[in-house]
Amino acid sequence: SAVAEARRAAPSVLWLPHLQLWWRSAHAQLRACLLSVLRDLPIDSPVLLLATADVADIEELPEEALTPFEGTNIGGEAVIHGMHPFDTDSRRAFFHGVGVAAATPPKPNSAPSSSKSMSASALSVPLDVAGKNTPKEAGPTEEEIARRAREDETDLRVMRAELRALATALLMNRRWKYFWQAPDPTEFPLWRRAAQGKAPCDLSSLLAAVDDESIALPGAFLKGVERVAEVAAAFFALQEEQEA
């Protein structure tokens, strides 16, 4: 996700423009996932979350959207600021320093340009043998290892939340109702033959595998979805053979 990438590339900036439009159009699960990921950010992480909203008053934004920006930062200043349109004088004052610096001619270079000015003593300094005094790169400290472990755990938690949301969306879609739950083997004995002990063989067991962390990566989740489709196709093929 963008938050995980920002943590790896820290110090970094996460920019969320038009917050009021994004919050209004985003799904509730996506908004909850964003808030959860932001809450998991370490307090000392050098990641700046910058959001902009074009509203007449801050009260027009939902209270839930303002939770990541409430309170005060280390300097004691509020982290929610209201901006107003700048007039001509304000713009000129802002760029005055840049204009003055651009109009000022550069100072003459006082360093000698001739190689003759180099003293003989400077040329006689012996050079170190390559690799002789090269410092060895130190390995990661225990604090760095612990920090990376926390980041990996946070990434896995976010990934499980995304996979759980996908499995729940499939279960709520009536187009896939034949895949929701495995039929009773006593009523449909061919199902046991089609499943052949494979798991997961339906969407409910796929969601259960995500919850118990048997499936924690997107690749395993996609293989589980393919397995559900394969078992269902084999079951219907066996039924057609029996009825023929």
Image (tube, rainbow, N blue to C red):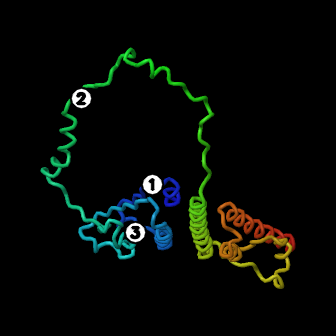
Q: Quarter of the image holding residue 221?
A: bottom right
Q: How far across and how far down the image is residue 187, in percent?
A: 82, 84
Mark 3–mark 2 Cα distance, whole angstroms, equals: 52 Å
Q: Are marks 3 and 1 in contact (CB under 8 Å)?
A: no
Which of the two discs, 3 and 2, labels the residue nearer the N terminus? Answer: 3
Q: Which mark is residue 107?
A: 2
Q: Secondary structure at mark 3?
A: helix
What distance separates the C-alpha of mark 3 from that of mark 1? 26 Å
Q: Amino acid at mark 2?
A: Lys
Which mark is drawn over residue 224?
none
Point 55% across, 26% down: residue:
127
The answer to whether residue 137 is above or below residue 224 is above
Q: Amino acid at mark 3?
A: Trp
Q: Which mark is residue 11?
A: 1
Residue positioned 66% across, 63% down in the render: 217
Query: Front-most of 176 and 141?
Result: 141
Q: Which mark is residue 23?
A: 3
The picture places residue 28, in percent across and down from the top left corner, at 47, 73
Most foreground residue, 128 or 55: 128
For marks 3 and 1, the one nearer the N-term is 1
